[in-house]
Amino acid sequence: VLGLLVWTLIAGTEYFLYPAFGWVMFVAVFYWVLTVFFLIIYMTMTYTRIPQVPWTMVGLCFNGSAFVLYLIAAIVDASSVTKDLDSHNYNSWAASSFFAFVVTCCYAGNTYFSFISWRSRTLQ
C-alpha cells in the first residue's frame, strides 16, 4: 500500500519533465509489481509446489535489492523536491518522498527478517 502511494503521488504530477522523478517512478512501480507478484505466490502457497527454488535466498535478494534501490530512489526523490521547480506539484512530491522513506524502512526490516530466515536455514 505504501509503495502504491509513492508512485501514485508522483504519477499524478508532471514528473516526466524531471528525469529524477522518472527514476523514482521506475523503482516504485517495479518493486510494487514484484511485491504483489511475491505476495500472490506466498498467499497461494505456490512456492511449495516449486521446491527447487531456494525461496529464502530469493526473498533475501529481493528484499535486499529493494532496500538499496528504494533508499537511492528516496534520496533522489527528497533531493529533487523544491518549490522552485513547480509549486503546484510540491505537496505531492514531498509526500511521495516521505512515503518512499517509509517504504525503505519496511524493506530494511523485511531484509533483516529474510536474513535471519536464510541464516537459520543454512545452519540446519
Image (tube, rainbow, N blue to C red):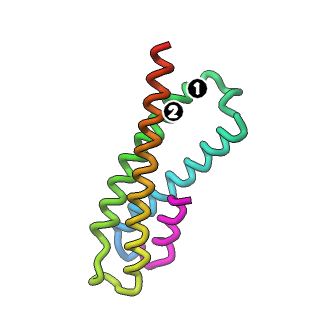
Quadrant of image for the N terminus: bottom right
Circle on res. 39: none
- From this view, report whether residue 112 is shown above or below residue 91: above
Task: Tell me the SS state at disc 2.
Answer: helix
Q: Is residue 84 left or right of residue 22?
A: left
In the rendered image, residue 124 lying in the magenta stretch gets the answer: no
Main secondary-structure element of the magenta-colored stretch: helix
Asked if disc 1 and disc 2 are in contact, CB closer than 8 Å, the reply is: yes
- From this view, report whether residue 37 is shown above or below residue 19: above
Task: Tell me the SS state at disc 1.
Answer: loop
Q: Is residue 77 left or right of residue 118?
A: left
Residue 40: horizontal and vertical position, in percent? 67, 44
Residue 121: horizontal and vertical position, in percent? 50, 20
- From this view, report whether residue 71 is shown above or below residue 109: below
Circle on res. 58: 2
The answer for how far apart the CA atoms under marks 1 and 2 are is 8 Å
In the rendered image, residue 12 lying in the magenta stretch gets the answer: yes
Residue 10: horizontal and vertical position, in percent? 46, 71
Q: Residue at x 35, y 53 (%)?
A: 71
Instruction: Report the amino acid beneath label 1.
Output: Val
Instruction: Report the amino acid beneath label 2.
Output: Val
Q: Residue at x 43, y 79 (%)?
A: 14
- From this view, report whether residue 41 is shown above or below residue 28: above
Q: Residue at x 40, y 46 (%)?
A: 67
Residue most toward the bottom?
88
Badge 1 or badge 2: first in the primary sequence: 1
The residue identified by callout 1 is 53
Quarter of the figure with residue 96: bottom left
Which residues make up the magenta segment? 1-15
Residue 94: horizontal and vertical position, in percent? 37, 73
Q: Residues within 10 Å of mark 2 (few under 14, many from 20)?
A: few
Q: Is residue 14 left or right of residue 45?
A: left
